[in-house]
Image (tube, rainbow, N blue to C red):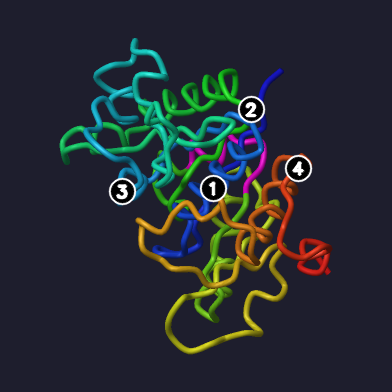
Amino acid sequence: MQATTLALVGATGGAGTTRTAVELAALGARDGRDVAVVDAAFTTQGLSEYVSGRIDPDVTALVTDETGASLSAAAYATDTGSSDRDGEPDLSGRADLLPARAPFERAARAKTAEAAWKLERRIDEAATAYDAVVVDAAPVGSNEAVAAVTAADRVEAVTPATAHGRDALQRLRGRVADVGGSVDGTVAVARAEGPAESDVGENADTRLPAVDPAVESAPAAATGTGDYVAALAETYERAFDAALGIEFEEPGLVDRIRS
């Protein structure tokens, strides 16, 4: 059976899309599932920051120079910050990242319409190898972002919980509609610093509380049980139509967030 594929699309740059994708993968792996995050943001290549060590090949190579390579060749385990004796992430499932880490010339070739079609096929391939697939996409304005929206079963917009993010969400809805898709859910991400805008993002399907934005602080979902991880659990369950067997600090916390 094909896994559910979720395209997380940033309404703006710096919305927190990549971090959210990594956290969702870690949360699924914590619950015993195999989850992949496929990079479809070839300009920023932010997903590569969550991988330790050398990245070769990367996802752009799979859609340009190494189209015959297996998907697993570009899959790298999430660094959870805690390991078992064998040095593997201490999760009962797998949280694999397929990042873009390419020089300008190859990244440019990976942005062509032909490469985007191949990216769609790679996303479909991932859905046969994993229990869930998250595609990390930039605001829809490039071939690879269109491929993410087209290939995914579900599209969720990620916005900063600010007035700017709220306005950008409306533009994103129009862009997704232009390529024949729709935004099925919204995730508003509170900022860790800056003025509080507590009323913004209240209408989102999920509002993620502020969290340490440093790459090395992720994934909090590998072990955490607080408000941030509970809100991520709500997002995971909604997006993948799945029930997670993870206990949180306070009984009923997820239900209170949902309400």
Q: Circle 3 sits on which residue? A: 49
Disc 3 residue crowd, few under 14, some 14–19, many 20+, Cα 10 Å: some
Q: Between marks 2 and 1, how big is the CA–CA gap?
A: 17 Å
Foreground pick, 57 / 121: 57
- 129 sits left or right of 141 in the view: right
Residues 46 and 137: in front is: 46
Disc 2 to disc 1: CB gap under 8 Å: no
Q: Quadrant of residue 32?
A: top right
Q: In the displayed structure, would residue 232 be above or below residue 81?
A: below
Q: Position of residue 246 (x, y in %)?
A: 72, 47
Q: Name the residue at 64% across, 27% down.
A: 131
Residue visible at 54% across and 73% down in the picture? 190
Residue under label 1, please give it.
222
Residue 149 painted magenta? yes
SS state under label 4: loop
Q: Which residues are magenta?
A: 146-155
Tell me the SS state at disc 1.
Answer: helix
The reply to whether the C-beta atoms of the residues labelled 3 and 2 are less than 8 Å apart is no
Amino acid found under the numbered disc labelled 2:
Asp
Callout 3, which amino acid?
Answer: Glu
